[in-house]
């Protein structure tokens, strides 16, 4: 039951993230001269198609759950960059969106590298040749008396 709730919350957050990222992509796409002359509904549909295309490409490369995780990471990084941009009052919102995309790509790339390049650490444990068994026996006897 708990896993079903987690899955539903993840899907809802991913869907909200796709809508949010489509709005951010629309803000970016309106800077393109040809896109700025289009009607608002076509701008929104194009931005939504761009985000869905990104989701589709990641799904083809990995799988659907990994694509949702990538979208959620991009959403969180974009929200953090928007918060920083809002706090320092950056006028150029395009730079904030591009920074969020760049940070997300680097972050996920480093994570991908670390997952596929695991370092082996050799641990050596030394045990005394003759362990003191009388201490363990005394502890056991004292626990039985309780």
Image (tube, grey):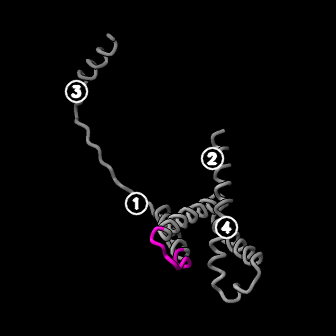
Tag shown at residue 119? 1
Question: In the figure, is residue 141 to the left or right of 25?
Answer: left
Give the spatial CA distance, label 1 vs label 4: 31 Å
Give the total of numbered labels.
4
- Residue with the mark numbered 3: 132
Callout in the foreground (3, 1): 1
Q: Residue at x 68, y 65 (%)?
A: 19
Tell whether position 91 is magenta.
Answer: yes
Give the spatial CA distance, label 3 vs label 4: 61 Å
How many C-alpha atoms fall within 10 Å of the one at disc 3: few (<14), some, or many (≥20)?
few
Callout in the foreground (1, 4): 4
**Is mark 4 in CB contact (under 8 Å) with mark 2?**
no
Q: Residue at x 73, y 86 (%)?
A: 37
Give the spatial CA distance, label 4 vs label 2: 20 Å
Residue nearest the viewer, comparing 133 with 26: 26
Give the spatial CA distance, label 1 vs label 2: 31 Å
How many C-alpha atoms fall within 10 Å of the one at disc 1: few (<14), some, or many (≥20)?
few
Callout in the foreground (1, 2): 2
Helix, strand or loop at disc 2? helix
- Residue with the mark numbered 4: 55
Q: Quadrant of the C terminus?
A: top left
Helix, strand or loop at disc 4? helix
Mark 4 or mark 2: name the one nearer the start of the chain.
2
User: Farthest top residue?
Assistant: 145
Highlighted range, magenta: 87-96
Tell whether position 19 is magenta.
Answer: no
How far from the left and from the top, in percent, is residue 86?
50, 69
Residue nearest the viewer, comparing 4 with 137: 4
- Residue with the mark numbered 2: 6
How many C-alpha atoms fall within 10 Å of the one at disc 4: few (<14), some, or many (≥20)?
many
């Amino acid at each position: 039951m708990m896993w079903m709730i987690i899955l539903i919350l993840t899907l809802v957050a991913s869907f909200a993230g796709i809508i949010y990222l489509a709005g951010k992509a629309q803000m970016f796409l309106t800077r393109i001269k040809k896109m700025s002359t289009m009607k608002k509904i076509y701008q929104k549909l194009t931005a939504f198609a761009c985000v869905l295309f990104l989701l589709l490409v990641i799904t083809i490369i990995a799988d659907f759950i990994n694509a949702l995780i990538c979208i959620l990471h991009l959403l969180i990084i974009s929200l953090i960059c928007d918060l920083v941009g809002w706090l320092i009052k950056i006028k150029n919102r395009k730079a904030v969106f591009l920074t969020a995309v760049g940070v997300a790509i680097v972050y996920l790339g480093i994570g991908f590298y670390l997952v596929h390049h695991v370092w082996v650490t050799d641990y050596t444990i030394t045990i005394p040749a003759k362990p003191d068994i009388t201490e363990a026996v005394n502890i056991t006897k004292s626990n039985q008396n309780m």
